[in-house]
Image (cartoon, rainbow, N blue to C red):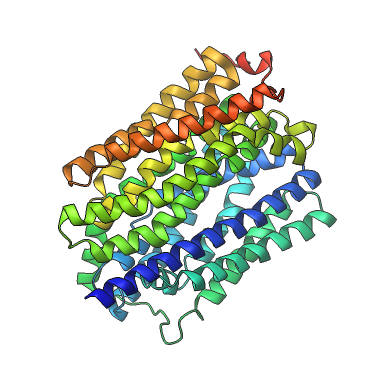
Amino acid sequence: MSSEKSSEKKLAIKGAAWTIVSYGSSQIIRFGSNLILTRLLFPELFGLVGLAQVFITCINLFSDIGLGPSIIQNRRGEEREFLNTAWTLQVLRSFGVLLCLLAITWPVSHFYQEPRLLWLIPVIGINSLITGFNSTAIFLLNRQMAVKKVVIFELIIQSAGTLVMILWALFDRSIWAIVVGGYAASIIELTWSHFLLPGKSNRFGWDKEAAKEIFSYGKWIFLSTALFFLCSQADRLILGKIFSLEVLGIYGVAFTLGDMPRQVIIALGGRVIFPSISMLADLPREELRAKILKNRRLILIPLAVGLAIFVSSGDWLVLKLYDNRYVAASWMMPILALGIWHTTLHNLMGSCLLAVGQSQYGAQGNLLTFVSLCIGIPLGYHLQGNLGAILAIALGDLPTYVVISYGLYREKLTCFRQDFQLTAMFVGILALLLFCRFALGFGLPIDKLSPADMIPVNSLF
């Protein structure tokens, strides 16, 4: 038993290390390509693609029945019949996604009064059909916590897609650079995925019991991911109507930078915490809680320090790396990054609830967060212009934290005391850094905020 626990611990440590390597490398690629492409392409194009991606992501998440989590969590997750059933469902879903995208294209284009969306949404949406044929080997590797192999796989795909995007943009500074780069990444991912695990190739098949188990486990995941989309994309859905495409593109840059800490937490939750807690789900709750809190503290302490540094100095990063067209991103980014703290607290524990089979709390939290954003963003914009909208986004998912905390209380996995202690530490470090910066004459991270940013341009009420 002790050797088994030691093996699981080593897998978790290796998984966490490779996840951090993956995150760092992925962000370097993403950040580097962002810097190059923002010099080659106009901000308007990023706003246009971002708006199209909102609806593509919408249809993909609204049709998510939790195939990946089912393979990772289910006791039959490595059986051929189960995998083939999951793959068949995945392929069928991809055709459904493309048909839905074709159906919504005209209404979306008409609502935003942007005719280019008529062809852009279905053209980018073809990627969903391509990835629908990906092998289930990707999910199997995550189940086995073979994080190194998954990381290498994903980084090479990301690098290839980015390279194609940049090369195309050098010769043709149009939106097609982004589109073709996406195609390249999807085709490479599809082809390579079927060679990840020799002897584990997928075939069309149907096992009634497997399908029943997938749908049973996935019903709350379906609702949760659908609502997660509404939460994660509500900002762009609403801002797409409030902001111009240029300002929406600038917001996209700020969000990409400010969201970086959250992405590593999501990766840790999906690749390390969820699989490892799934292995320990049968332990007595008190013992399981102790293990979770111990490991959670090890993640949150360095994150608190890093996030405080990021919030207090992130505006310099924007001003140094981007030209004057993106100056507004320098005050948006620290505010968005500040909201990552409470997001991190509930993201880590949300993975634990999922691992013990309690996926309903995530769905309920996402629903309340969506309502919060739908009310908060327009109201914030009405009261304080762009600043009010950004503040509403940063605080928007507090309802999810409340619901997840309630779920943890019900499941005897509470972490209130730890949250309070670490939040106090984070606020203290941030306050000290901001005081030092101001005392040394470097001002505050939101110094580029102008009076015009606090006045609504469009009348919403």
Image-based side of 178 in relation to 93, left or right: right
Task: Identify the residue at image location x=58%, y=31%.
Answer: 433
- The residue most toward the bottom is 199
Give whichever of 21, 233 is nearer the camera.
21
Residue 110 higher or lower than 50, as above or below: above
Task: Identify the residue at image location x=57%, y=13%.
Answer: 459
Percent coordinates x, y for residue 23 in the rendering: 55, 57
Percent coordinates x, y for residue 351 in the rendering: 33, 52
Give whichever of 390, 1 is nearer the camera.
1
Quarter-of-image position of residue 361: top left
Give whichever of 145, 422 is nearer the camera.
422
Residue 444 higher or lower than 301, as above or below: above
Quarter-of-image position of residue 83: bottom left
Percent coordinates x, y for residue 191 in the rendering: 56, 75
Percent coordinates x, y for residue 171 in the rendering: 84, 56
- The residue most toward the right is 171
